[in-house]
Amino acid sequence: MPLSKQDKIDIYREMVLMRKFEEKALEMYEAGKIGGFLHLYIGQEAVASGFMWAIEPQDYVIGAYREHGQAIARCADPRRVMAELFGKIDGVSRGRGGSMHLFDKEKRFLGGTAIVGGGLPIAAGVGFAIRYREENAICLCFFGDGAVNEGAFHESLNLASLWNLPILFICENNKYGMGTAVERASPLPNLFRRAQCYAMEVESVDGMDVLAVCDMAERCVKRVREEKRPIFVEAVTYRFRGHSIADPGRYRTKEEIEEWRKRDPIEQFGKVLVSEGTLSKDEIAAIAAETDRIIEEAVAFAEASPLPPPESLHEGVYA
Amino acid sequence: MYRQALNQALREEMRRDESVFVIGEDVAQYEGAYRVTEGLWKEFGDRRVRDTPISEEVIVGVGVGAAMLGLRPVVELMTINFSLLAIDQIVNHAAKIRYMSGGQFTIPMVTRMPEGSGMQLGAQHSQHLESWFAHVPGLKVVGPATPYDAKGLLKSAIRDDNPVVFIENQLLYTSKGEVPEEEYLVPIGRADIKREGSDITIIAYLRMVSLAIKAAENLAKEGISVEVLDLRTLRPMDVPTIINSVKKTHRVVVVEEDWPFFGIGAQVVDFIQLYAFDYLDAPILRVTSEDVPMPYSRELELSALPDEHKIISAVKRLLGHV
């Protein structure tokens, strides 16, 4: 089904929101409001937006540690994501998780894992449970290019295919596992080929083109749901910022980053929307202003939220 | 028998609760490497008794993911040695997801894993790694010594809403003991006085409990009254029962089959010095396996393990009967 005008506007607004959220998170990090690691999603927005658009409320989502984008798309409440980064009680994980461990049970967002490849075995369990209970759901499992060299990746793909588990594996190939280029980590530069040996359907999509991602996502989600078989999609994308805030960035050139910035998924999509008449330039500017306001509210919400009380330290270790 | 008691616990809980399922290597058609899952596949079928490839990490991952959705997985790892291939899922995920998610998700999962030594299986098949798991907040660690406790504790573990590492001992599978017909549970977190005594307390768990009881029987012939305390649960540890026994006997030997460095006994000793220092009449001794990888050769292996003689020597040393 082609995207409606409203779909396109919603997706564009969401991508802008993700971008502005991350830019603000960086600012807040530098201001000392956010601690620990901060892995920004800037440049990869089309991937989370496109796939999240294609799923239903009953579906499950597992992210890795660069998951602010997925969390915002799924949970639709940047205030509580920002509060989590601030370590506040109103954060999605009550301040106990942080940037890498965002969870939202109600929205079936299962985290947030900071161990490369660690989400894939859990996705297999989610797929198993879906079939066990005969739910009409699927599991979206996001991970990076680094995960494909972990043992957990291979164990999970093998089992998912063997047991016909309804999982859409989404490999966000942003070209670098921290500072190591994919070609220095994998003899096969096309990572989807890794999945082929598990008798699994594979796809590849331009992760900088949100319309291509939406189209791919819609087809894959439908097939996984109907056929109850896993599909593996490699979304080729690029992070404009470092691996984390601490990244000195010596492993790639400014020219390379500039080349990719020319393909900025938000700018590209914005141009398409203007040229086809879906949005005017004024409306684009209005969306920017509106999302700025939402992000300012998120910061205000995070600032105002209380810290978890010290006496709650031991709460929640055990049920 | 211990193995049948475990089998009964699984069968009863699977009949009682549709959300309980069993997964692991050769648990279904083969009926379990140690036959603990005998007959379950015939009764419950592929859906609830599921053979897997040899892929420990994803086996436990299936448990974690299914538990997040509210099922109650009973994961079997063929031995504790192979749990090292799955430790990321157990330690980084199962143990932490509840806390990291601010209490939104619970992991009601049991991971069963037998351990054992003394069977000439060599260094990679003869480890006692319970302290690895007992170290980790978010996990519970259970280790029954008798068929009665095996059944009652496994049923409790399956009903528990937390990830429970359930450790069995391969040499105990054929051990005999009373198991009632009627429904019962043994609570997690409670130690058990397996034999009452007044001169000294031996604290043990898993296979070491039966060695301690034999030692106590022989020492009784020499007029020494030994209390045998079975920890049963390693985490959370039943500190009050330990302290009460120390207050009564004033002397303690801890017997454990793991290595001495950072072993379970080291934690027991810490609790005793913290809460019962003034009641001690002697230092606490630990009888452990030797601090070596397990050798294959029969005599060497036996010399590396705790035995009745080593326990009796430790008791006599503490009582000044050297």
Image: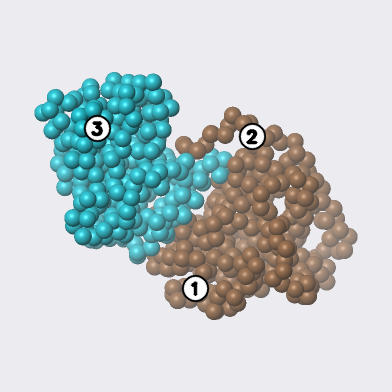
- Give the image's coloring scheme: by chain
Q: Nearer the viewer, residue B41 or A224?
A: B41
- Measured Cα–Cα span from mark 1 to mark 3: 63 Å
| Nearer-the-camera pick, B29 or A26 | A26
User: Dot 3, crowdedness within 10 Å: few (<14), some or many (≥20)?
Assistant: few
Tell me the element at label 3.
Answer: helix
Residue A129, position as x, y percentages in the image? 43, 54
Q: Which chain is brown?
A: A
Chain letter for mark 3? B
The residue labelled by disc 2 is A308
The number of numbered discs placed on residues in the rendered structure image is 3
Q: Nearer the viewer, mark 2 or mark 3?
A: 3
Q: Nearer the viewer, mark 1 or mark 3?
A: 3
A125 vs A41, nearest the viewer: A41
Give the amino acid at mark 3. Arg
Q: Are marks 1 and 2 in contact (CB under 8 Å)?
A: no
Give the mark nearer the N terminus: 1 vs 2: 1
Chain under label 2? Answer: A
Find disc 3 in the rendering and name its residue: B317
The numbered mark at residue A195 is: 1
Residue pictured at 28% horizontal, 40% vertical: B287
Subunit of label 1:
A
Q: Position of residue B111 (x, y in %)?
A: 36, 49
Query: At label 2, which amino acid type do we have?
Result: Pro
Does residue A186 appear in this view?
yes
Give the residue at x 69% y 47%.
Answer: A35
Instruction: Specify few, some or many for label 2: CA neighbours under 10 Å numbering under 14, 14-19, or 20 or more.
Output: some
Q: CA distance from mark 2 to mark 3?
A: 52 Å
Which of the 4 quarters of the picture holds residue B243?
A: top left
Residue at horizontal 57%, vertical 51%?
A111
Q: Nearer the viewer, residue B215 or A104?
A: B215
Within 10 Å of disc 1 (Cα), the crowding (few <14, some 14-19, many 20+) is many
